[in-house]
Image: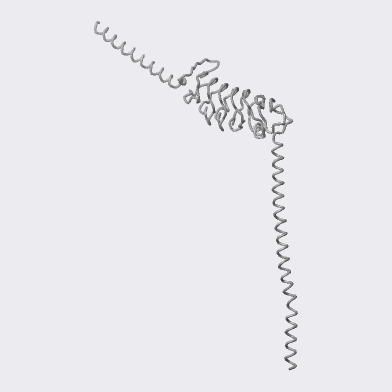
Amino acid sequence: MPLLADWLLRHSVVMCLLLHSLVLISFCFQHADTSCSKSCYCSENESSGKMMRCSNLQLTEIPQDIPNDTQRIYLDYNLLTKVPTNAFAGLPHLVELDLSHNELSRLDPAAFRGLGPSLRFLDVSSNKLVNFSAEAFEGLRSRANLTNNPWHCDCNLQRALLRVDLEPTSLTGIVCNTSEPKDIGVQGQAILLKQDVDLCLVMKRTTDVAMLVVMFGWFAMVISYLVYYVRANQEDARRHLEYLKSLPSKQGKSEESSTISTVV
């Protein structure tokens, strides 16, 4: 009996150690799959999914180690200056992205590529965005907060608005801080609400004037060539005519010489 008890005790201890090791290994693998980005805080619940908060951390670049099962990312109140191409690629479950209150002045083409099917809300408010790029919002159909940016309203912006698929109400957040032309009356106004304004009209007029100038230049060139051609041909014609006039007199002198020689 003592031997049996000792044997059972030793094997139970070994089994407990093995079980404990398996639990630790599984926990490590799970933690590796769903670990949080450095310096950020992550939480998860059934209603809102996995959330990663990196607010007010003085970040100058978007983290590269964002877990791919993240559904909400908060990068507000940092020092981000741009969103590079494919910055959030590989995040197929992301539904909310907050980039507000940063120093963003540029959104590279395809900055939010891959988020089109899942993203529901994008916040880039209170930044330093001046130029609106349709390529940056490629594929997005979400609602966006574009307010409190020093937008420059010109023909390029007006054309870009026609090429994005964002919810139309989002575009009312583009309030013109400056405009081209300056006297068109859109400064301080939401460009989407100024439907009677054509910011491309001046460009069209400029293009028309340029075409007229080019056409006038070609016309003047053609006229100059024709004048030169006519004058050159007139000179040749005059010389040829003088040559023809000189021919009868020489022929007459020749006939006269022949007549005299015959008489003699």
Q: Position of residue 199 (x, y in %)?
A: 70, 33
Q: Nearer the viewer, residue 61 or 44?
A: 61
Quarter residue 208 falls in: top right
Q: Nearer the viewer, residue 123 or 59?
A: 59
Q: Position of residue 255 (x, y in %)?
A: 74, 85
Residue at the image point whose x is 54% and y is 27% from the top: 81
Furthest toward the top, the residue is 1
Quarter residue 145 falls in: top right
* Image position of 209 with respect to 5: above or below: below
Residue at the image point whose x is 70% and y is 45% from the top: 211
Q: Is residue 60 left or right of residue 178?
A: left
Instruction: Tell me if residue 260 can be seen.
Output: yes
Looking at the figure, which quarter contains the C terminus? bottom right
Q: How many marks?
A: 0
Looking at the figure, which quarter contains the N terminus? top left
* Image position of 159 with respect to 65: above or below: below
Q: Position of residue 202 (x, y in %)?
A: 71, 37
Q: Please, which colouring scheme is shown?
A: one colour
Residue at the image point whose x is 75% and y is 80% from the top: 249
Q: Position of residue 80 (x, y in %)?
A: 53, 25
Quarter residue 157 falls in: top right
Instruction: Tell me if residue 122 can be seen.
Output: no
Residue at the image point whose x is 61% and y is 27% from the top: 141
Q: Is residue 155 left or right of residue 41?
A: right
